[in-house]
Structures are given as C-alpha cells and as structure tokens.
Image: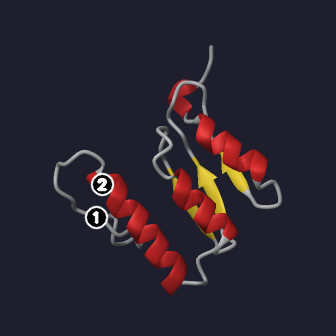
Amino acid sequence: MDAEDLEIELITVPTVKNAADEAIRKKAEEMAISNREIPIFIFASGDGYFARTVVKLITTFRKKVVLMPYCKDGTHHLYRKINEANNQFTITFLRPYFFKSG
C-alpha cells in the first residue's frame, strides 16, 4: 500500500528553512476552503509553526484539529494557549509513542 492508495497527497518542496511547513500551511487552508466536507485536520509538529493556521481552522472554518506535537513536554506552549482560549472548539493532543515514559 502506498500514499496514493491511502489518498495522501505528497508535497515536494525545496530544501529551504520552513519550506515544507509553509507548503503544508497553505495546503491546509486551501483544503479548508475548497473541501468543506473535511471535518478534521491533523498536524504532527512541535515548534508552533502552525499556530495561526490552527486558530484559523477552528475559528473561521469551524474544523476540529488534532495536534501530535513532538516536543519534549508533549505540547508547544502556543498550542496550549490556543486550546485554552478556544475551549468551545476541539483540539486534541496526541503524545507520540517515542516520548512514552518508563
């Protein structure tokens, strides 16, 4: 099974700082506008780069957002602030397996 079988669109970007993040941010916003039937967006990011996009998705487009941050404390402080400020929306935090304690 490959990405196409799973209906995952691969994005190719130049090797410039934040180029991949910027391409993903733009694609998420485009998809929120053009594909209203998509209810949930998932981001695996620990640096807070998608914070503005997360706010836009939950407030403007009324989407659910799942964050899988890979920073040591489990959630970037910007994402925690967004979650606290927008408690009427759904932001789910998933802790990656490789941060499992014990």
Is residue 24 visible in the rendered structure shown here? yes
| Callout 1–callout 2 Cβ contact below 8 Å | yes
What element does badge 2 sit on?
A: helix
- Vertical comparison of 79 with 23: above or below: above
Hey, which quadrant is residue 8 in on the image?
bottom left
The residue lying at 60 percent from left, 67 percent from top is 57
- Vertical comparison of 79 with 43: above or below: above
**Mark 2: few/some/many CA within 10 Å (<14, 14-19, 20+):** some
Nearer the observer, 15 or 92: 15
In space, the residues marked 1 and 2 are separated at their CA atoms by 8 Å
What element does badge 1 sit on?
A: loop
Disc tally is: 2
Amino acid, disc 1: Ile
Quadrant, the N terminus: bottom left
The residue lying at 30 percent from left, 65 percent from top is 10
Q: Which mark is residue 20?
A: 2
Q: Is residue 28 left or right of residue 41?
A: left
